[in-house]
Image: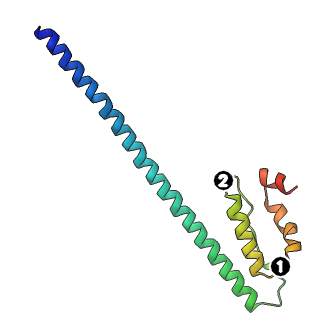
Amino acid sequence: MDEELQRLLQQLAADRVQPEREFDEQRKWREEEQVQQGKDRKRHDEETRAYLDLIAKLAETRKTDSTKPASLSVKLVPLGAEDDVEAYLVTFERIWTAHGIDENRWAHFLAPQLTGKAQLELG
């Protein structure tokens, strides 16, 4: 009887350890996910600030140097595979609006900057 009781106690202890391990693994995964989300949020915020700074500088340049054609003072970074297409287009629109470039000319400047699916959609 003692052996049977001992075996049952060991089984109960083993059964208890498994859920604790699973819980610990899930908790660790959630913590790692939160850290990654924080990094992603920080990167997004930094990129947004950089775009807004660029827009402000471009708008200021436009005000102080009205003799220079706007199309020559704008340098676009091509859309990358990892970039958010919607955010890229919003930024593009803000930059070109700040430079006072007519919307009818935007496609001429935008098309060379697009790649992959975004380029296919434009075509």
Q: Residue at x 31, y 28 (%)?
A: 18
Rendered location of residue 106, percent (x, y):
84, 70
Q: Quadrant of the C terminus?
A: bottom right
Which is in the foreground here, disc 2 or disc 1?
1
What residue occupies the far left of the structure in this picture? 2
Rendered location of residue 28, percent (x, y):
38, 43
Q: Residue at x 73, y 59 (%)?
A: 79
Q: In this view, does 60 lie above or below 95?
A: below
Q: Mark 1 points at which residue?
A: 101
Q: Quadrant of residue 57?
A: bottom right
Q: Determine the secondary structure under disc 1.
A: loop
Q: Residue at x 88, y 73 (%)?
A: 105
Q: In this view, does 15 lie above or below 78?
A: above
Q: Which residue is drawn at 70% across and 70% down?
A: 91
Rendered location of residue 66, percent (x, y):
80, 90
- State the CA–CA distance, disc 2 to disc 1: 27 Å
Which three-letter amino acid code belongs to the residue tagged 1?
Answer: Ile
Residues packed near mark 2 inside 10 Å, few (<14), some (14 to 19) or many (20 plus):
few
What residue occupies the far top of the structure in this picture? 1
Q: In which quarter of the image is residue 74?
A: bottom right
| Residue 7 appears left or right of 56 | left
| Residue 113 appears left or right of 34 | right
Q: Determine the secondary structure under disc 2.
A: loop
Rendered location of residue 3, percent (x, y):
14, 9
Going from the N terminus, do you reach mark 2 or mark 1 first? 2
Q: Mark 2 points at which residue?
A: 82
